[in-house]
Image (tube, rainbow, N blue to C red):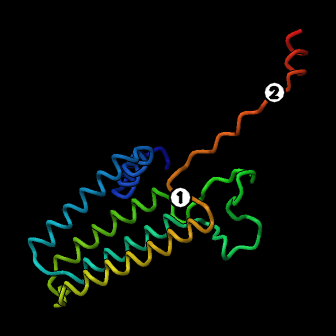
């Protein structure tokens, strides 16, 4: 502005790094796994913080459900934009409620916020952790069962992004003779 060179702010630098990570899916998830390992180490060595871990787990479960869900739920939408249900229906790509990039970014943010919250004993609420673990596993199992039943009922697979290939056409013999002559 006015020809004066300006130094990029920390936010701009961070955004530039995120922009470079967009096409590198494997690297992004390796980074998320690294945050998970750091979080587990932090909670293990700090001891406690089961409520924080439970909250992070529920948040990531919610993100996963949104990631696996179609943007237009066939049970809720009556506007004709539902998923194809027959093989001769027009191909419509699976559009997620939560895109993969936002799923990754929110997951990383959850681990960072969780690590930050484990720095203060104020958030270390004493609870009997086996009950939280059991409830989390039960909640995850029931939620994923419901989501898988929804996928089977409406015949969509959120993890395949490939367009189906059209069936091979049988060419009429008369037409082949005309083309050959």
**Vertical side of 82 occupied by 88: above or below:** above
Q: Where is mark 2, residue-wise? A: 171
Q: CA distance from mark 1 to mark 2?
A: 34 Å
* Residue 158 x %, y %: 53, 58
Q: Nearer the viewer, residue 9 or 40?
A: 40
**Vertical side of 57 occupied by 134: above or below:** below
* Residue 26 x %, y %: 36, 46
- SS assignment at label 2: loop
The answer to whether 80 appears left or right of 54 in the picture is right
The answer to whether 174 appears left or right of 52 in the picture is right
Q: Nearer the viewer, residue 179 or 71?
A: 179
Instruction: Determine which of the numbered discs, if any, sits on residue 50 in the image.
Output: none
**Vertical side of 77 occupied by 70: above or below:** above
Given the current orientation, which residue lies at the most extreme top position? 181
Q: Quadrant of the C terminus?
A: top right
* Residue 59 x %, y %: 37, 75
Instruction: Please tell me which residue is depicted at 34% across the width and 66% down the height of the picture.
Output: 109
Q: Nearer the viewer, residue 63 or 89?
A: 89
Graded by Cα atoms within 10 Å as few (under 14), some (14 to 19) or many (20 or more), the crowding at tag 1 reads some
Q: Earlier in the sequence, mark 1 or mark 2?
A: 1
Residue 134 in which image quadrant: bottom left
- SS assignment at label 1: loop
Instruction: Please tell me which residue is depicted at 70% across the width and 50% down the height of the picture.
Output: 91
Given the current orientation, which residue lies at the most extreme front position? 173
Q: Where is mark 1, residue-wise? A: 158
Total labels drawn: 2
* Residue 4 x %, y %: 43, 46
The answer to whether 156 appears left or right of 60 in the picture is right
């Amino acid at each position: 502005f006015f020809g004066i060179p300006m130094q990029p702010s920390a936010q701009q630098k961070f955004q530039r790094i995120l922009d470079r990570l967009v096409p590198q899916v494997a690297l992004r998830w390796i980074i998320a796994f690294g945050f998970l390992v750091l979080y587990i180490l932090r909670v293990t060595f700090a001891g406690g913080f089961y409520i924080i871990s439970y909250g992070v787990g529920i948040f990531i479960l919610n993100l996963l459900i949104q990631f696996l869900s179609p943007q237009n739920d066939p049970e809720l939408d009556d506007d004709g934009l539902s998923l194809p249900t027959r093989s001769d229906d027009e191909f419509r790509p699976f559009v997620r409620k939560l895109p993969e990039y936002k799923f990754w970014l929110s997951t990383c943010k959850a681990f960072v916020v969780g690590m930050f919250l484990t720095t203060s004993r104020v958030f270390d609420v004493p609870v009997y952790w086996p009950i939280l673990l059991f409830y989390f596993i039960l909640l995850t199992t029931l939620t994923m069962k419901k989501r898988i039943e929804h996928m089977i009922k409406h015949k969509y697979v959120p993890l395949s992004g490939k367009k189906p290939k059209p069936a091979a056409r049988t060419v009429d013999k008369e037409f082949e003779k005309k083309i050959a002559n």
